[in-house]
Image (spheres, helix red, strand yellow):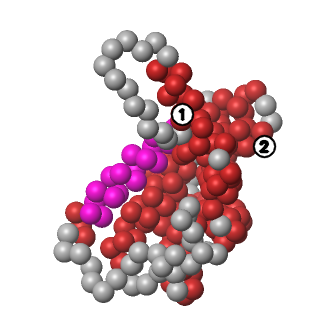
Amino acid sequence: SLRGIGAGSRPGRQLGSGFMLGCISLALFLTIFLLLGERSLAPSVPADWSWRAGRALGSALVVGVVEETIFRGYLLGGFLRDGSRLGAVLWSSALYSAVHFLRAPVPVTPGLHPGVGLQALVAHLRPLGRPEVFFPFVGLLLLGMLLAYAYLWTDSLPFAIGLHAGWVFLVMTAGLLLREPTGIEWLYGERGVLARAVGWTLLLFMFPVLRLWIRWTSIAARLSSPKSDHR
């Protein structure tokens, strides 16, 4: 199912291309938030900015590799073997969204508890039935679909890893340059921007941007590659 993990002969270039798109796209979204007054520039940059940026880069790459290998590599690739392309994208993206809400405290005490595994499973699944989870679930579903098509349109898992890592990196380093969100309700509620129509619109806008980026980078790669000699 990991059919595009190698990305041909240039996985590093695909990784860098995805990372650049992730950083540029999220930087544009943050610029929109600045213009709307949702974010503002920080008065000064922290003295340890280089250490924090390096740590964020390492974390972003780990998150990108782990999540994309599981959800776009194994799951999406597996669903593609047994069903339609759209169905595979929807199922893998729905699972990607759902796991973000599987969190629950499960108190345990010393001793033998044969049913603790089932109790933990029920506790972790319970948040999915709450009405307030629906809107952020839709936002993460769209995000998963965008990453799925990034993988399918490039046939490159490194590209999807780079795109995901670029978003995570900029989210983690945005605090170095920007103040905390002001909390404009229609734009950025307590569930985050992905739970709002503005976030959904930005994600939908990313689909044609992704297409154009892939086409532009593929043309640039062909033009920069040395021509083969014909003898």
> Measuring 41% from the left and 75% from the top, which residue is drawn there?
180
Foreground pick, 49 / 100: 100
Of mark 2 and mark 1, the one earlier in the sequence is: 2
> Measuring 66% from the left and 72% from the top, which residue is drawn there?
198
Q: Is residue 215 left or right of residue 162?
A: right
Foreground pick, 228 / 31: 31
Q: Is residue 204 visible?
A: yes
| The residue stretch that appears in magenta | 52-70
Could you tell me residue 214's position as x and y percent? Answer: 63, 60
Q: Residues within 10 Å of mark 2 (few under 14, many from 20)?
A: few
Q: Is residue 17 visible?
A: no
193, above or below 9, in the image: below
- Residue type at mark 1 is Ala
**Residue at mark 2:** 86
Quarter placement of the N terminus: top right
Q: Residue 54 magenta-drawn?
A: yes
> Measuring 39% from the left and 78% from the top, which residue is drawn there?
179
Q: Is residue 204 left or right of residue 180?
A: right
81, above or below 170, in the image: above
Q: Residue 125 magenta-drawn?
A: no
Foreground pick, 51 / 197: 197
Tell me, for residue 123, which label it has, or none: 1
- Residue type at mark 2 is Leu
1, above or below 150, in the image: above
Magenta part, dominant SS: helix
> Measuring 64% from the left and 55% from the top, which residue is drawn there?
132
Q: Secondary structure at mark 1?
A: helix
Could you tell me residue 63's position as x and y percent? Answer: 43, 47
Q: Is residue 133 left or right of residue 21?
A: right
Q: Secondary structure at mark 2?
A: helix
Foreground pick, 190 / 155: 190
3, above or below 138, in the image: above
